[in-house]
Amino acid sequence: MAKYEIHDVAGGVPIKAWTNGVPVDDAAHRQLENVARLPFVHGHVAAMPDVHWGIGATVGSVIPCKGAVIPAAVGVDIGCGMMAVQTDIPADRLPDNLSAIRNAIERAVPHGARKDGGWRDAVPPRVAHRFTDSGLADGLSTLEDKHPAIRKANSLVHLGTLGSGNHFVELCLDEADRVWVMLHSGSRGVGNKIGRYFIEQARRSIEKKGLARNLPDQALAYFVEGEDALFDDYVQAVGWAQDFARANREVMMERVLLTLKKHLPRFRTEKLAVNCHHNYVARERHFGADVWVTRKGAVRAGDGDLGIIPGSMGARSYIVRGKGHAESFHSCSHGAGRVMSRSDAKNRFSVEEHKLATEGVECRKDAGVIDETPMAYKDIDDVMAAQADLVEIVHTLKQVVCVKG
């Protein structure tokens, strides 16, 4: 069984890392140490096997805070996460040439801002009601009134659209050769606007208090619960963005399933559907204290929780069930994790190498996606082995179609 390693940090709490057998760059370790030195971190910082350097804070880290939140630790892709749905389509019903299905999915799931005249026109009623009956849309309006800087954030015009970079829609086959739909996206422009705004407000607040010089990294500016007026507003804004991100994935999934029904009629979805965040903050109880847990590039893996851990283009992905490991704060990795920067990948690998790495997958095979080639990521099997005590594998998926944002 995999075990975590403990790294003591001078002037801070320990780092407990599930990184046995996977590479961790020095920059990521320094970021973890900086977080561990913050005075309000509860107990220790947990590092997942996909850990790597990130903007503001390390991707693949779990940070429990008593009475504080760090906006940059959540980041700007608030609520980014995964959704997967199992179908009853057997692999032998798929056509030999999957390009038509890939093209149809690309048409069904818009990339970038929507220009169709309004989000309600294409949103399924069971998703749309969240923005009316539940007051989610009103919640955004309230935040915009208090913080006009986030007013022009494209908000609802991005509902049902795919982000860029590592965001994707895939068709996968499981161990029984059944087709799954899996996708990865978040809160889009509105989450980005909210994140950047509150990160800057936290920085100004820390400077005004004269505490900036005490921070190990200026990107780790924070709000204190009950002390900073913006604390509650930030928590509300993050909660809104997380709900939006979840609904965004549901709308895209609905469109992809409708598209498949046009190409592969007479199929149904099975009961198993998973929708989970991996960039978010939540109020939870760990080691006898109520804390704000930030998972940046990490998924909740409480006892019985279902999660999704995707590999890169051309690699396996996994549907997992959490084991509720206390030391990881009930968490696991959110994917394979980058092993090199996007620019390094573009400089190091050729289109031909990318084609070989994605052989058998209907996907883009051009210079524009070299930064997402499988070689730019850690080996997903090594990552899974390193966290065997955090999750159990329920299904193993291999993609056959990959649509990149």
Image (spheres, helix red, strand yellow):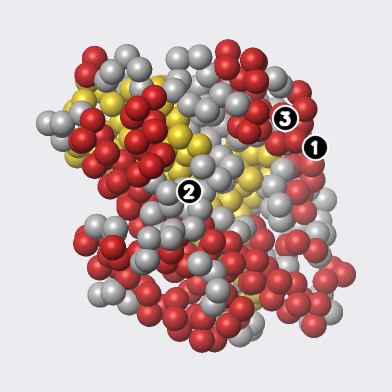
The residue at which mark 2 appears reads as 111
Which residue position holds label 1? 26
- Residue under pointer 3: 346
Q: Is residue 198 above or below residue 227?
A: above
Quick one: label 3 or label 1, which is nearer the N terminus?
1
Q: Amino acid at mark 3?
A: Lys
Element class at badge 3: helix
Q: CA distance from mark 2 to mark 1?
A: 35 Å
Using residue 254 as the reference point, say whether residue 300 is left or right of it. right
Q: Residues within 10 Å of mark 2 (few under 14, many from 20)?
A: some
* Along the line of sight, the residue nearer the viewer: 326 or 404: 404
Q: Is disc 1 surrounded by few (<14), some (14 to 19) or many (20+) residues within 10 Å?
A: few
Query: Residue 159 at what x, y percent from top left?
Result: 40, 59
* 29 relative to 312 in the view: left or right: right
Residue nearer the viewer, 152 or 88 = 152
Q: Amino acid at mark 2?
A: His
Disc 2 is placed on an element classified as loop
Residue at (23, 30) in percent of width and height: 263
Camera-side residue: 152 or 79? 152
